[in-house]
Image: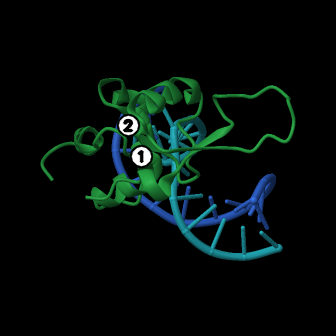
Chain colours: A green, B cyan, C blue
Amino acid sequence: MQLDFGGAVLLIVADIPSGRVATYGDVAAMLGSRGARAVGRIMATEGSSVPWWRVVRSDGRPPAGHGLVALEHYRDEGTPLRWLATDDDAEFDEANDYRLDLAAARWRP
DNA sequence: CAGTTGACAGTCC
DNA sequence: GGGACTGCCAACT
């Protein structure tokens, strides 16, 4: 690949259609690398120019520290979400008490 | 130039 | 089902 690793990651993320998501591992696999962390690092640095919220963890959770921001995008794009059951009226952390429905939202080329 | 760090993943307990 | 440990790769100090 002639592009830098970072550039390739941005291309993959930019290729993810609205309403769909892909895991870091999937993106890394597309690049032929297994560095899921490397992908995450690129998003941390160059992710400002791409829909980073479409790239999530294998857990179905958005990037650390940006759960609420990502949630806004998901609700806006209609991305399938799975809210954690709350058996109590305790504080409901929108930023962390939800997970993406990877089974339905996972993007596959 | 070597070690540390980090928007992670997979496996084991 | 959830927590802990290890493995990966690229950028930063």
Q: Residue at x 23, y 43 (%)?
A: A15
Instruction: Kindly indicate the quadrant of the structure image that contains residue A106.
Output: bottom left
Q: Residue at x 42, y 27 (%)?
A: A76
Residue type, numbered disc 1: Ala
Q: Residues within 10 Å of mark 1 (few under 14, many from 20)?
A: some
Instruction: Kindly indicate the quadrant of the structure image that contains residue B10.
Output: bottom right
Q: Residue at x 57, y 25 (%)?
A: A68
Q: Is residue A45 depicted above or below A19 in this figure?
A: above
Q: Which one is in front, A14 or A77?
A: A77
- In the picture of the structure, the residue carrying the numbered disc 2 is A42
Q: Which one is in front, A93 or A37?
A: A93
Q: Is residue C4 depicted above or below A62 in this figure?
A: below
The reply to whether callout 1 and callout 2 are in contact (CB within 8 Å) is yes
- In the picture of the structure, the residue carrying the numbered disc 1 is A38
A4 relative to C12 in the view: left or right = left
Distance between mark 1 and mark 2 Cα atoms: 6 Å
- Which residue sits furthest left? A2
